[in-house]
Image (cartoon, rainbow, N blue to C red):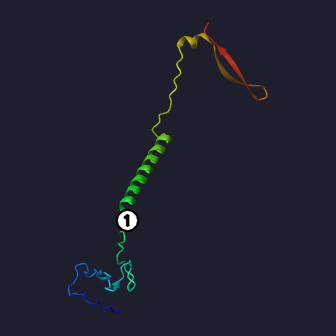
Amino acid sequence: MSVATSPPPGGATPAAAAPARVPAAEACPLCGAPLHPDQEWCLNCGAAARTRLAASPSWKSLIAALAVVVALALGVLAAALVSLSGGSSTTPAITRTVTSAAALTSTPATTPTTATSANGAATLGTSTTGAK
């Protein structure tokens, strides 16, 4: 439906009656279908007409950092377990008993002796020898 306008009386065109700006119809960047001004997605192909989708995040650096942290934690755990177990480098304790010659001569020594009785049974006795 078109409306015809008549020229103003006097044949002069007023300056205030400039034609209104009509926005140019936009087209879908993918299929070229016309888009309405408030339309964000193409109704023909479904592509984003005015909406820009964010790129997917890169997980490579996060996974690499996590792998390094896990490796360091396992290394520290292994070192702690080796430290707690003590390893096989322990030396046995050596105990030395020192007796003096004076201690040996001052006390009588007892020596076990075995005697055989008349019936053939062995009896155990001790004999004392000492320094006189």
Image quadrant where residue 5 sits:
bottom left
Q: Quadrant of the C terminus?
A: top right
The residue positioned farthest toward the right in the image shown: 119
Tell me what residue is drawn at x 46 percent, y 41 percent: 83
The residue positioned farthest toward the top in the image shown: 132
The residue positioned farthest toward the left in the image shown: 12
Q: Is residue 84 left or right of residue 25?
A: right
Q: Is 26 located above or below residue 126 in the figure? A: below
Residue designated by label 1? 57
Q: Is residue 12 left or right of residue 57?
A: left
Image quadrant where residue 32 sits:
bottom left
Tell me what residue is drawn at x 53 percent, y 13 percent: 101
Tell me what residue is drawn at x 20 percent, y 88 percent: 11
Query: Across the whole image, how many numbered discs are drawn on residues?
Result: 1
Give percent across and percent down for residue 129.
Answer: 64, 14
Name the one closer to the observer, 27 or 125. 27
Name the one closer to the observer, 93 or 118. 93
Give percent across and percent down for residue 115.
Answer: 72, 24
Q: Is 60 located above or below residue 16 in the figure? A: above
Q: Are there few (<14), some (14-19), or many (20+) residues within 10 Å of tag 1?
A: few
Q: Quadrant of the N terminus?
A: bottom left
Q: Is 27 located above or below residue 101 in the figure? A: below
Q: Is residue 104 left or right of residue 56?
A: right
Name the one closer to the observer, 92 or 57. 57
Give percent across and percent down for residue 102.
Answer: 55, 10
Tell me what residue is drawn at x 38 percent, y 59 percent: 62
Type of amino acid under label 1: Pro
Name the one closer to the observer, 77 or 65. 65
SS class of the residue under badge 1? loop
